Amino acid sequence: MTERNIVSVSEYNSWRNCGEAAYRKYVLNERGEPPTPELVRGSVVHRVACINLRAKKSEAARPCGTEETMALADAAWSEALDKNGVRFSGAEQEEGSSVVLGKEHDRAVRLSALHVEKIVPEVTPIEVEEDYTSEHPLSILGDQHLRGILDLVDRPSPGPSGMTVIRDMKTSKSKKSAFEVYGSFQLVIQAILYRLKTGKRPDAARLDVLVSTKGGKNTAPKTYVQEGLPLVTVEEDDEARVLEAMGRVVAMRKAGIPTPPATTGRDWFCSQKWCPFTGDCRFYNRRADSHAR
């Protein structure tokens, strides 16, 4: 199996968000600019969460306590900045780079502590961040194998025949809606990966949303796990919808023709905040990007 016989979940996300950015990354192999502070924060929280979840899965280790977790997050933050650097949008530059970095660093530490206090105790991990590639090509993807990361497979009911729940974690500055959960591509793709690996569908999927609000002039920032979000059951038609979309992505990549976003400069991804290629992108509209102003 060669690398070009694989379509990854991250590649699909890139093509779905912006054909130009995906073309530059996956066809021209361009790296682009460093991540923004907000993206660094998300990756740090995810990394520390995985350390604690793996420790809980292992009989020879234990999850860190709150103070240890906060120290881990602090170290992971420094390492990420040293390794990848960081870039700032126009709005962040106006606010002040040191101010923005300080806020996102504090959020990363608080959210990591929240995860180990509230999420880790309630899960029974059977898979943690497993890199999985389908054994056979998927017919709807032509000759392509599907590759992705199974973030967390939880078995809240004891025993090998207990209920299996796919869990995906998001960090956010505001609450997610039930609509966003039911429409989550990530939950569907995680369920597909689990089915390809085990031969059966998970019983349910859920989104763990860790919220760290900005706070206001008269209100302090709040950090909490969002309650009340629904469990999702991933059905065959959900899988078919996502895989059909991925099949179109494979065709776009094979054609090697970049496709700009439909609403250039106004699409959420066409922004200094999220895209590493805005610095020299021919489609980027700086005047339409609120984060550049």
Image (cartoon, rainbow, N blue to C red):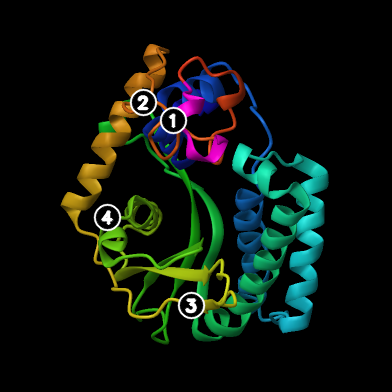
Residue 97 x/y as whole percent: 74, 47
Residue at position x 58%, y 74% in the image: 221
Residue at position x 53%, y 79% in the image: 119
Q: Kindly give the residue lying farthest to the front in the view shown.
A: 217
Depth-wise, is mark 2 or mark 3 nearer the camera? Answer: 3
Which amino acid is tagged 4? Gly
Depth-wise, is mark 1 or mark 3 nearer the camera? Answer: 1
Depth-wise, is mark 1 or mark 2 nearer the camera? Answer: 1
Residue 235 x/y as whole percent: 20, 58
Q: Which mark is residue 225?
A: 3
Residue under circle 2? 250
Please determine whether, in this image, residue 128 is positioned above or below residue 80. Answer: below
Depth-wise, is mark 4 or mark 2 nearer the camera? Answer: 4
For this view, does 280 lie left or right of residue 193?
Answer: right
Please determine whether, in this image, residue 163 is positioned above or below residue 259. Answer: below
Q: Is mark 1 on a helix, strand or loop?
A: helix
Observer-nearest residue: 278 or 293? 293
Q: Report the Cα–Cα distance between label 4 and label 1.
A: 27 Å
- Is label 4 in contact with label 2 (beta carbons under 8 Å)? no
Which amino acid is tagged 1? Ala
Q: What element carries label 4?
A: loop
Residue under circle 1? 288
Please report the bounds of the magenta region as a residue range: 284-293
